[in-house]
């Protein structure tokens, strides 16, 4: 249990540090946070929305399937967007970083649990398994969403390879030790 806890705490910190670097100093996710000179006009147009995520164009909830299909077909070839709207910008980095660390540590704890089931755990099996776990998350969530919503996933594939590779190196060195 001690190995799992130490492995997950250090692994959670590795993930958190990479995520901080990726989204800030290295700006790996620049394609997802682009600037537009029309931001003030866009935000003004959205001011009456309820908080939530919107897919535009769309049909009202409860629209029969055949009507929904007609609305979508009538918009083929026209502009579309997804909008995540919030009433106010909040900067709560302390709580966000705490929540991120807890989720990261929990994720690495689950990976440690898997790795410690191996009869003969070694560095390469820990590294490959860590990369595989990261790839499963990327493929089944991030990449599938990019298929439907045509979003760039370059930053996420970089994150997957780097952060889970680093965690795999850490766990491959630490867990097999007596």
Image: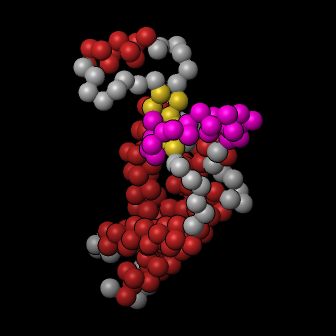
Residue 172 vertical position relative to residue 143 in the rendered view, above or below: below
Camera-nearest residue between 87 and 35: 87
Q: Could you tell me which residue is drawn at 34 percent across and 69 percent down? A: 110
Q: Which quadrant of the view contains residue 102?
A: bottom left
Give the residue drawn at x 35%, y 12%: 70
Is 48 a magenta residue?
yes
Q: Is residue 177 visible?
A: yes
Q: Quadrant of residue 92?
A: bottom right
Task: Report how many numbered discs are placed on residues in the image.
Answer: 0
Position in image of residue 111 (x %, y %): 37, 68
Q: Is residue 9 magenta?
A: no
**Quadrant occupied by the C terminus:** bottom left
Q: Position of residue 142 (x, y in %)?
A: 46, 45
Q: Residue at x 43, y 10 (%)?
A: 74
Judge from the rendering whether residue 51 lies leftward or rightward of residue 162; answer left or right: left
- Residue sitting at the far right: 37
Q: Which residues are magenta?
A: 34-54
Viewport quadrant of the N terminus: bottom left
Q: Is residue 124 visible?
A: no
Please indicate whether residue 82 sits to the left or right of residue 24 in the image. left
Question: Which residue appears at 51% of the width and 38% of the height?
Answer: 48
Which one is in front, 168 or 17? 17
Image coords of residue 175 (percent x, y): 42, 79
Q: In this rendering, is residue 19 above or below 98? A: above
Colouring mode (rainbow / by chain / secondary structure / one colour): secondary structure
* Horizontal side of residue 80 vs 28, given as left or right: left
- The correct choice, above or below, for 103 with respect to 65 in the image is below
40 versus 23 height, above or below:
above
103, 113: nearer the viewer = 103
């Amino acid at each position: 249990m001690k190995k799992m806890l130490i492995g997950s705490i250090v692994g959670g910190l590795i993930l958190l540090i990479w995520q901080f670097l990726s989204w800030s100093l290295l700006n790996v996710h620049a394609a997802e946070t682009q600037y537009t000179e029309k931001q003030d006009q866009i935000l003004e147009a959205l001011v009456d929305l309820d908080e939530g995520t919107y897919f535009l164009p769309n049909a009202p909830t409860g629209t029969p399937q055949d009507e929904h299909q007609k609305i979508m077909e009538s918009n083929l070839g026209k502009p579309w967007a997804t909008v995540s709207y919030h009433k106010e910008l909040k900067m709560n980095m302390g709580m966000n970083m705490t929540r991120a660390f807890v989720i990261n540590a929990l994720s690495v704890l689950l990976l440690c649990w898997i790795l410690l089931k191996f009869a003969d755990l070694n560095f390469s099996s820990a590294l490959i398994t860590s990369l595989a776990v990261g790839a499963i998350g990327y493929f089944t969530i991030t990449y599938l969403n990019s298929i439907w919503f045509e979003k760039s996933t370059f930053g996420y594939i970089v994150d997957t390879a780097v952060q889970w590779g680093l965690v795999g190196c850490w766990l491959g060195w630490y867990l097999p030790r007596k």
